Amino acid sequence: MRYVSAQLDAYLADDLWLKLAAHANRMATRLAEGLEDAQDVELVYPVHGNEIFVRMDEGFAECLRDDGFEFHGWPGRVGLYRLVTAHCTAESEVDEFLEAVYATDGG
């Protein structure tokens, strides 16, 4: 129990949890803003956290997966996908995903 408690204590100290969450949210906003002009990707909901829901053709999604990107389809909703950013998501990773989207859709 001490091991888990030590991790939790560090996570709460100096608002580390808040800094990490804020970074994940900034990366989601950056990603969503970058997707706004994509021809083959539609933002389904406004972004209020670190998850982005998009609609895209399954073939388009498969091309992005073939490029090495990981994301999940939303169960029961064909063509709806969930993109998630985290405390460790780098700006360069967001940029690479956006580059792949625009290279694939031509827009």
Image (tube, grey):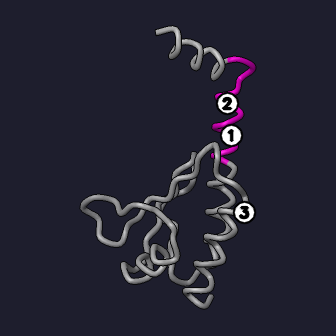
Q: Position of residue 99 (x, y in %)?
A: 66, 77
Q: Which residue is mark 2?
A: 18
Disc 3 from disc 2: Cα separation: 22 Å
What amino acid does circle 1 point to? Answer: Ala
Residue under the point 75% across and 20% down:
14
34 drawn magenta: no
Disc 3 from disc 1: Cα separation: 17 Å
Point out the stretch of residues depicted in magenta: 13-25
Disc 1 from disc 2: Cα separation: 6 Å
Q: Earlier in the sequence, mark 3 or mark 1?
A: 1
Q: Earlier in the sequence, mark 3 or mark 2?
A: 2
Dot 3 and dot 2 residues touching (CB under 8 Å): no
What amino acid does circle 2 point to? Answer: Leu
> What secondary structure is marked by label 3?
helix
As drawn, 11 above or below 54? above
What amino acid does circle 3 point to? Answer: Ser
> What secondary structure is marked by label 2?
helix
Q: Nearer the viewer, mark 3 or mark 2?
A: 3
As drawn, 15 above or below 9? below
Q: Residue furthest top?
A: 2
21 drawn magenta: yes
Q: Residue furthest right?
A: 14
Residue under the point 64% across and 52% down:
89
Label count reads 3
Residue 22, numbered label: 1
Residue 40, numbered label: none
Label the magenta part by its dominant secondary structure: helix
> What secondary structure is marked by label 1?
helix
